[in-house]
Amino acid sequence: MIPVRCFSCGKVISNVWEEYKERIVSEPPGKVMDDLGIERYCCRRMLLAHVEIVDVLRRYQ
Amino acid sequence: MKVELIELREDRIRFLLTGATAAFANGIRRACMSEVPTLAIDEIRLYDNTSVLFDEQISLRLGLIPLTAEDLDVYSSPEDCICEGAGCPGCRVDFILTAEGPKMVYSQDVVFTDPGVKVAFEGIPVVVLGEGEKLVVEGYATKRTGSAHSKWQSGTTCGYKNLPRIDIGDCQKCGKCVKVCPRDVLALDEGDRVRVVNLLACSLCKLCIDECDYQAITVTPVPDSFVLTIEGDGSIKAKDLVVKAAEEIRHRAEMIGEKMADLS
């Protein structure tokens, strides 16, 4: 699961995660983050470096 | 003291404070971060959680969701409440969250007993539930300040810097300082003379001073002018945040005044 807020600055970033995930398929991530109002590099790495693993974990429930 | 507005958005305010000390600017910054109260989910009871996340992870995620209240003043913090911290409707807002998979549980699925209290952002994923997985949570939110825990912090990113003052003396029009500036503060005008075009963007890094072979440029901080940038967590408008922070400082100053009057 995407962390609710940015680790460094505390800005809520998870509310744009799903839109981000959809849009990076066809657009460059940097541009998408600019559009979504994710400005600082601390917040940008939250989205950019996130790997969703809950669905992998579910197999071992 | 003078305040000049530079930028105003719902979640962020930038303003120029002149005729103040660094201690005062820092006081505003710190009050925004740790003295302006807000609501946050405090304790939860989990009746059922068969999701992939541990109970603790769910409680952490719920705590971080910013909450807005139509009228925050109707709630008191548990320490100041008439119930003396035992827990009553005056200092607690109860909520329930129930969901059954397969579905994504979002922040807006948290239902508060007070219709005036809402999550500040919809669409924050709390947990994803697979086929047959269940989540039943009940709990309450309380009003506290950022000094208790960062989840109650209304001002998240708050900072200030001195207003820079850039003086250009005997310029040789080489344009090196314009190229080296990472924030495009300087530009060459028609007469090829260096001109300051974006003073507020200057971070006083002084790269331009090092680059100039003729020592024609000086950058100095103006000691009594500050550019403050205050960003809220979404639970309160940035504008109101600064006003409340200033009120808090006044309140404390008055308290000191009263204490001092008692002593003498």
Image (cartoon, coloured by chain):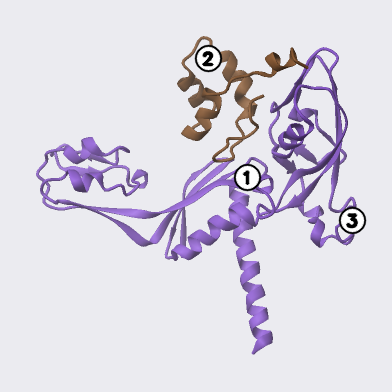
Chain colours: A brown, B purple
Q: Earlier in the sequence, mark 1 or mark 3?
A: 3
Q: Are marks 1 and 3 on the same chain?
A: yes
Distance from label 2 to label 1 (Cα)?
Answer: 30 Å
The percent coordinates of residue B201 (x first, y second) are 36, 43
x, y percent for residue B59: 76, 36
What count of labels does the image hold?
3
Amino acid type of the residue tagged 3 in the rendering: Ala
Query: Which quadrant holds residue B235?
Result: top right
Mark whose residue sits in front, 1 or 3: 3
Say whether marks 2 and 1 touch (CB < 8 Å): no
Q: Quadrant of residue B95?
A: top right
Is residue B11 depicted above or below B2 in this figure? above
Dots 2, 3 in contact, CB < 8 A? no
For residue A38, above or below residue B27: above
Question: Is residue B53 rendered to the left or right of residue A48?
Answer: right
Residue under the image location 55 percent in, 14 percent down: A23
Q: Which mark is residue A24?
A: 2
Badge 3 is on which residue?
A: B86
